[in-house]
Image (cartoon, rainbow, N blue to C red):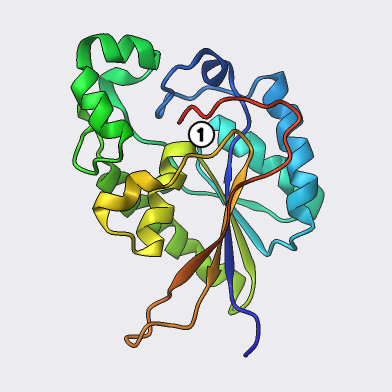
Amino acid sequence: MGERRRIVFWRHGRTDWNAAGRFQGQTDIPLNDDGVRQAAHAARLLAAMGPTAIVASDLERTRSTAEALATETGLPVTLDAGLRETNAGSWQGKTFAEIRVTEAEQLGRWEEGDVTVAAGGAETRLDVAARSRSAVERSLPRVGESGTLVVVSHGGAIRVVLAELLGLPHELWGALSGLSNCNWSVLEERAPAPDGSARWRLGEHNAGSLLVPVPIVEG
C-alpha cells in the first residue's frame, strides 16, 4: 500500500511569558529572540520532511514560527483561529505559582488532564480539542492522499488534539506530555476505520533539536 498522510504538530518558539512561566492562553505575545532562533533552526529540520501544506494559529507567536518554515519551503501559511491556545480566562497572564495560591484544586485537576475543568473559568480541554480537530480537518484535504500537513499551534492545544485524534479515552489524556518550545509531534495515518473515518498512530512525540533548552510551560 502506498504512503499515507502525516500531520506534524509544531509548537511555537519561546516567548518572554514562556520564560517567566506565565500562562499565555490567547494573549497575543510575540516570540522573543530565543524563539526566533528556535523557529529558524527547527524550520530547517522540518523542511527535510517534505511538507505539503502549512496551517497555523492566527496568534503572532505561531504566525512567526510558521513563517520560518514558509521561508524554507516556499509554501504559503494558512491561518485558522481554531488552532489557538486554550482561552484560560482569569488565569491568563498569571504564573502557575500565582494560580496555585488561589485555585490549587482546579489547577491540579487541569494539569492532570481533567477534560471537564474550565481553565480560568473559560475553555475546557474538550472545547479546545473539538475546535482544534475541526481546524485540522479543514486543512487536511490540501495535502491529498499522501502529503504532510504541518500544524503550527500551542502546547496545550496540541496536547489535546493529539489525544482526540488518537482516540484516547478522556481519563488517559493526562498521560501525554506537553511539547517544549519549537518541538513537534507526528501523527501517521493508519488504514481507515470500517466506517471510512481516518485513524492515526503517534510516530514521534516532543521531538526536536533545540538551541535553547527550556522547561515545558503550556501556552
Is residue 199 or residue 86 the one in the foreground?
A: 199
Task: Confirm whether residue 70 shows in the render.
Answer: yes
Task: Confirm whether residue 81 shows in the render.
Answer: no
| Residue type pointed to by label 1 | Leu
Residue 16, horizontal then vertical, whole percent: 58, 16
Residue at screen point 42% across, 75% down: 198
Is residue 43 or residue 201 the one in the foreground?
A: 201
Residue 86, horizontal then vertical, whole percent: 36, 35
Residue 105, horizontal then vertical, whole percent: 19, 23
Q: How packed is label 1: few (under 14 Cα within 10 Å), some, or many (20 or more)? A: many
Specify the quadrant of the image occupied by residue 144: bottom right
Residue at screen point 52% across, 13% down: 20
Question: How many marks do you count on the picture?
Answer: 1
Residue at screen point 71% across, 36% down: 39
Above or below residue 97? Residue 9 is below
Is residue 16 or residue 70 the one in the foreground?
A: 16
- Quarter of the image where the N terminus is located: bottom right
Determine whether, in the image, residue 155 is placed left or right of residue 108. right
Determine whether, in the image, residue 3 is placed left or right of residue 89. right
Q: Which residue is mark 1?
A: 59
Residue at screen point 77% across, 54% down: 47
Q: Secondary structure at mark 1?
A: loop
Residue 112, horizontal then vertical, whole percent: 30, 36
